[in-house]
């Protein structure tokens, strides 16, 4: 038993450094715990800064401000030597402690308002969360003025209001299904308990809570760790939501620029492509006697013919788009001398593809094309008009051909 008692006493004794570099250095366990707590706060600051660089969320700024206040408060409450002006029992040190304690409460309201998911806090409660922090700062001098019971009582009431508002906000958010509120309720449970007991001592028992600081730092450490986990969860969900929003926006953009029947670009898309990178030539293609196909075989077969024509036109090097019922447009880029050959090859592919993909047709499907070379300063509207004139000429001259003007 004596040996066990000696071992326990040795474990409780201050730890003394063993290196020659710090031979005169000794550490007490409260100093070790303070160092661990300060290291945790520094990690939290770096953690918030890293994530803010990625997502730019405002609540990370407020949480960093709260963490900084905790750090300054821990330093002021530690036995660290900070010069004659900030001696442990000095008035300046007391001002430091009171100021950063109150600032930690002040930024908590702003943090909570920006941290919870949108729609979890009603507009009235959202506004109320902004008022108690201002009143707390107005009552800060109460802790430094001797014999001011009314002022101290007012301060205590403000602190109670702040505590109730914060708790009510988290509870309401929990009822509305807030995942973030779950983390924050757990994070603030320790601090809320310590503050609640302290206020009970101040308001009911009329004496300070002797174990306040002893319990406050473990509660703050728990709060920092659980809030960090909550922030990570919130940021992961925010990132997922943004990725889903970007994917949805991209899908909507594709839908807005794609013809639903053929999968080719639509008029909006081909105009954007024309304006981004002017082609050397443009063509308009129209299926010959398409109305007769619809009248004889029905619109379902007609849609299959249009789809097959789209596959044929999209198989070449030109950018193909469907710009009307049975009308298509082609943008040609590359060597101007090869445009006419490529255009005729694509036009002839229409009949071959339709025959293969819609074999029930009794007659071959042909197409007429109006092709035109364009200059660099030609607008999309002017180019389409010139191609339409040539398409009309192809129709008038017997269909199933290309009418091509060498230069516009």
Image (cartoon, grey):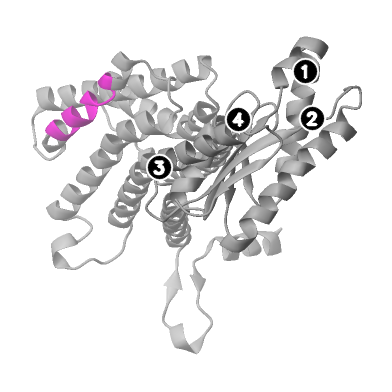
- Label 2 with label 3: CB-CB less than 8 Å: no
- Label 3 with label 1: CB-CB less than 8 Å: no
Which percent across, then down, holds residue 308?
78, 33
**Which mark is drawn over residue 396?**
4
> Distance between the Cα atoms at labels 2 and 3?
59 Å
Of circles 4 and 2, the one toward us is: 4
Q: Earlier in the sequence, mark 2 or mark 3?
A: 3
- Label 4 with label 2: CB-CB less than 8 Å: no
> Distance between the Cα atoms at labels 1 and 4?
20 Å
- Label 2 with label 1: CB-CB less than 8 Å: yes
**Which mark is drawn over residue 365?**
2
Which percent across, then down, holds residue 270?
53, 40
Which percent across, then down, holds residue 349?
78, 43
Q: Which residue is mark 3?
A: 57
Q: Earlier in the sequence, mark 1 or mark 4?
A: 1
Which span of residues is magenta-colored?
127-138
**Residue at horizontal 77 percent and vertical 18 percent from the top:** 293
Q: Is residue 244 magenta?
A: no
Binning the other alpha carbons within 10 Å of mark 3 as few (below 14), some (14 to 19) or many (20 upward) gives: some
Q: Earlier in the sequence, mark 4 or mark 2?
A: 2
Of circles 1 and 4, the one toward us is: 4
Q: Earlier in the sequence, mark 3 or mark 1?
A: 3
Does residue 131 appear in the picture of this structure? yes
Q: Which residue is mark 1?
A: 293
């Amino acid at each position: 038993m004596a040996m066990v008692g000696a071992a326990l006493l040795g474990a409780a004794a201050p730890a003394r450094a063993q290196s020659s570099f710090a031979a005169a250095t000794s550490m007490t366990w409260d100093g070790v715990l303070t160092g661990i707590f300060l290291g945790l706060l520094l990690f939290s600051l770096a953690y918030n800064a890293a994530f803010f660089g990625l997502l730019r969320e405002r609540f990370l700024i407020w949480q960093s401000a709260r963490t900084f206040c905790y750090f300054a408060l821990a330093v002021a409450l530690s036995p660290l030597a900070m010069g004659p002006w900030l001696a442990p029992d000095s008035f300046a040190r007391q001002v430091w402690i009171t100021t950063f304690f109150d600032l930690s409460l002040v930024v908590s309201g702003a943090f909570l308002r920006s941290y919870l998911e949108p729609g979890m806090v009603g507009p009235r409660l959202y506004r109320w969360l902004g008022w108690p922090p201002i009143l707390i700062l107005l009552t800060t001098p109460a802790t430094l003025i001797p014999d001011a019971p009314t002022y101290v009582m007012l301060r205590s009431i403000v602190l109670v209001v702040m505590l109730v508002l914060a708790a009510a906000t988290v509870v309401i958010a929990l009822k509305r299904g807030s995942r973030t509120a779950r983390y924050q309720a757990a994070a603030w449970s320790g601090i809320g308990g310590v503050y609640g007991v302290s206020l009970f001592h101040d308001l009911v028992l009329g004496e300070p809570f002797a174990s306040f600081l002893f319990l406050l730092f473990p509660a703050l450490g728990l709060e920092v760790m659980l809030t960090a986990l909550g922030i990570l969860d919130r940021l992961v969900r925010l990132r997922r939501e943004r990725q889903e929003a970007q994917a949805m926006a991209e899908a909507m953009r594709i839908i807005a620029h794609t013809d639903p029947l053929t999968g080719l670009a639509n008029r909006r898309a081909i105009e954007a492509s024309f304006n981004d990178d002017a082609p050397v030539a443009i063509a308009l293609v129209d299926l010959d006697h398409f109305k007769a196909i619809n009248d004889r075989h029905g619109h379902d077969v007609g849609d299959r013919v249009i789809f097959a024509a789209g596959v044929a036109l999209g198989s070449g090097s030109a950018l193909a788009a469907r710009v009307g019922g049975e009308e298509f447009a082609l943008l040609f880029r590359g060597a101007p001398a090869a445009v006419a050959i490529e255009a005729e090859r694509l036009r002839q592919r229409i009949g071959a593809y339709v025959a293969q993909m819609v074999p029930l047709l009794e007659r071959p499907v042909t197409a007429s094309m109006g092709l035109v070379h364009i200059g660099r300063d030609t607008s999309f509207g002017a180019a389409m008009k010139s191609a339409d004139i040539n398409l009309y000429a192809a129709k008038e001259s017997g269909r199933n051909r290309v009418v091509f003007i060498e230069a516009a």
